Image: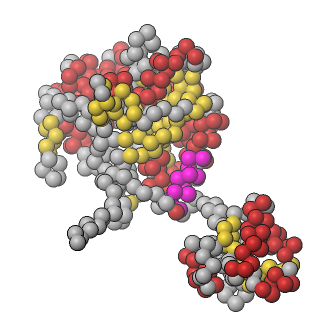
């Protein structure tokens, strides 16, 4: 007889099962974020996991020879289809397809999984949940972008963070674009330069790592080589000088390019409007953020945590931005007959979850059920009457599903699941019309109480 080969349970790299407290916290974060989205006037949208590849394009890949290397794409008849890698590109397709039916200013939110074929680890996944808020339409950009920052602050506080635990960093892509134009960096090299700058705060990079990527190549600690932008010394020096500027006034005096000055003016106007709300202290300028995605056109934002995060080995890691985004002037106009600007942000929910699991400041209401123990099969109908009574009074409850197990094993089951209460009724209780409840979190020897059945609901509510 042929020996059966047993499967080894496991997951591919970059994917994760979530359960117990981690999943409960995730649901709490999602509820908090969604409530803020609705409070800020957005309507929900859900798009399919797959899009026609050419409709959403590929704005991730750094390998120009293989632009779809960072996404999951498949052949579907005579077309290629791609698992969505963000929620902005599907939004652009949706707006272009339905713009006649949408309001002139369309605020939408979407909470869905996205997929990226990239290296995983330290809070980075190949399938992860994003929660997006976007404003599409011809609007006052200062107002719209200030609203994004107000929303980020409100949502993170609603999630349980304190104001000093995160910083919202903003800049404007026009500033660096004007510098690149002044330095006469070719269009073919500009995206490489922007992505090099975007890596400044990544682990192992810093100014030296960025400089290497601006020059011919960068070799990392493993010996892997990344091809650089191959700029000349003068171009590299000017970009590094720019990256050291921290103040908006100093930046205004240092850059003369009209496009750069336009971006600086837009940031100044943004801060004026932001000052009308309550989030001004949360928002800082950071001219080193440029956002690696090619479709951002002007305003950009990244939100970083101000506390240490460690991996499962206890090593401190940089998980990057937990909420980022910006304005995109041409993402929708790629489609025929449509030219609508937009601006938006995206919460990396799973990345935020990874960080918040390490804090002991967010209380979870687990609402675990009461367990109705089965002492005797002949009273099964009575146990179900108790079960129904509990549920009708909005008390989570379940009945033990194996009457052959003795009471000790039933209570061991309840303790393993950390249930709060067990209801124990035998022949004496049913004869006297009483109920015994066991407070599973109480002091041993003092945690059993018998009382009239009519008091069941009140007594249980004291313990759950």
**Left or right for 429, reference 24:** right
**x, y percent for residue 164:** 53, 50
Task: Identify the magenta region.
Answer: 21-31
Q: Is residue 23 magenta?
A: yes
**Left or right for 358, reference 199:** right
Front-most of 152 and 366? 366
Up the image or down, 438 lies above or below 369; here it is below
Up the image or down, 281 lies above or below 221; here it is above
Up the image or down, 404 lies above or below 126; here it is below
Front-most of 217 and 94? 94
Q: Can residue 283 be seen in this view?
A: no
Front-most of 250 and 370? 370
- At x 58%, y 16%, the residue is 101
Q: Is residue 213 visible?
A: yes
**x, y percent for residue 448:** 74, 84
Residue ranking furthest to the top = 337
- At x 19%, y 37%, the residue is 213
**x, y percent for residue 333:** 41, 15
Residue ranking furthest to the front = 1
The tally of labels here is: 0
Front-most of 234 and 336? 336
**x, y percent for residue 59:** 32, 30
Q: Does the magenta stretch include residue 445?
A: no
Residue ranking furthest to the bottom = 445
Up the image or down, 260 lies above or below 422; here it is above
Q: From the image, which quarter does the N terminus lie in?
A: bottom left
Q: Quadrant of residue 373?
A: bottom right
Q: From the image, which quarter does the C terminus lie in?
A: bottom right
- At x 43%, y 28%, the residue is 90
Main SS of the magenta part reads helix
């Amino acid at each position: 007889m042929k020996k059966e080969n047993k499967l080894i349970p496991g997951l591919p790299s970059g994917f994760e099962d979530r359960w117990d407290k981690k999943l409960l916290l995730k649901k709490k974060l999602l509820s908090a974020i969604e409530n803020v989205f609705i409070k800020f006037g957005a309507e929900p949208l859900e798009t399919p996991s797959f899009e026609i590849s050419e409709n959403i394009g590929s704005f991730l890949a750094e390998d120009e020879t293989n632009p779809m290397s960072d996404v999951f794409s498949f052949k579907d008849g005579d077309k290629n289809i791609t698992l969505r890698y963000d929620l902005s590109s599907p939004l652009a397709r949706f707006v272009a397809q339905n713009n006649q039916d949408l309001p002139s200013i369309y605020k939408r939110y979407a909470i869905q999984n996205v997929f990226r074929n990239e290296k995983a680890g330290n809070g980075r996944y190949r399938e992860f949940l994003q929660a997006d808020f976007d404003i599409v339409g011809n609007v006052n950009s200062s107002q719209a972008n200030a609203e994004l920052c107000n929303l980020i602050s409100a949502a993170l506080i609603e999630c349980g963070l304190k104001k000093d635990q995160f910083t919202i960093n903003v800049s404007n892509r026009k500033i660096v674009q004007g510098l690149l134009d002044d330095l006469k960096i070719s269009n073919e090299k500009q995206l490489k330069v922007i992505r090099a700058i975007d890596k400044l705060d990544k682990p192992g990079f810093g100014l030296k790592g960025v400089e290497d990527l601006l020059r011919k190549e960068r070799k990392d600690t493993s010996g892997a080589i990344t091809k650089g932008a191959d700029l000349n010394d003068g171009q590299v020096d000017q970009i590094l000088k720019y990256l050291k500027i921290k103040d908006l006034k100093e930046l205004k005096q240092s850059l003369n390019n009209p496009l750069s000055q336009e971006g600086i003016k837009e940031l100044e106007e943004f801060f004026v409007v932001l000052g009308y709300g309550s989030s001004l202290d949360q928002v800082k300028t950071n001219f080193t953020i440029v956002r690696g995605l090619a479709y951002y056109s002007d305003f950009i934002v990244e939100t970083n945590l101000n506390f240490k995060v460690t991996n499962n080995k206890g090593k401190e890691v940089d998980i990057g931005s937990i909420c980022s985004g910006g304005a995109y002037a041409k993402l929708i106009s790629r489609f025929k007959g449509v030219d609508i600007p937009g601006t938006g942000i995206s919460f990396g929910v799973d990345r935020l979850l990874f960080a918040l699991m390490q804090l002991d400041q967010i209380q979870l209401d687990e609402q675990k059920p009461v367990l109705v123990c089965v002492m005797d099969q002949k009273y099964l109908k009575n146990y179900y009457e108790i079960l129904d009574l509990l549920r009708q009074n909005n008390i989570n409850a379940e009945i033990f599903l194996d009457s052959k197990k003795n009471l000790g094993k039933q209570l061991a089951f309840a303790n393993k699941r950390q249930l709060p209460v067990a209801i124990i009724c035998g022949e004496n209780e049913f004869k006297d019309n009483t109920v015994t409840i066991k407070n599973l979190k109480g002091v041993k020897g003092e945690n059993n109480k018998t009382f009239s059945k009519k008091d069941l609901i009140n007594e249980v509510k004291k313990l759950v």
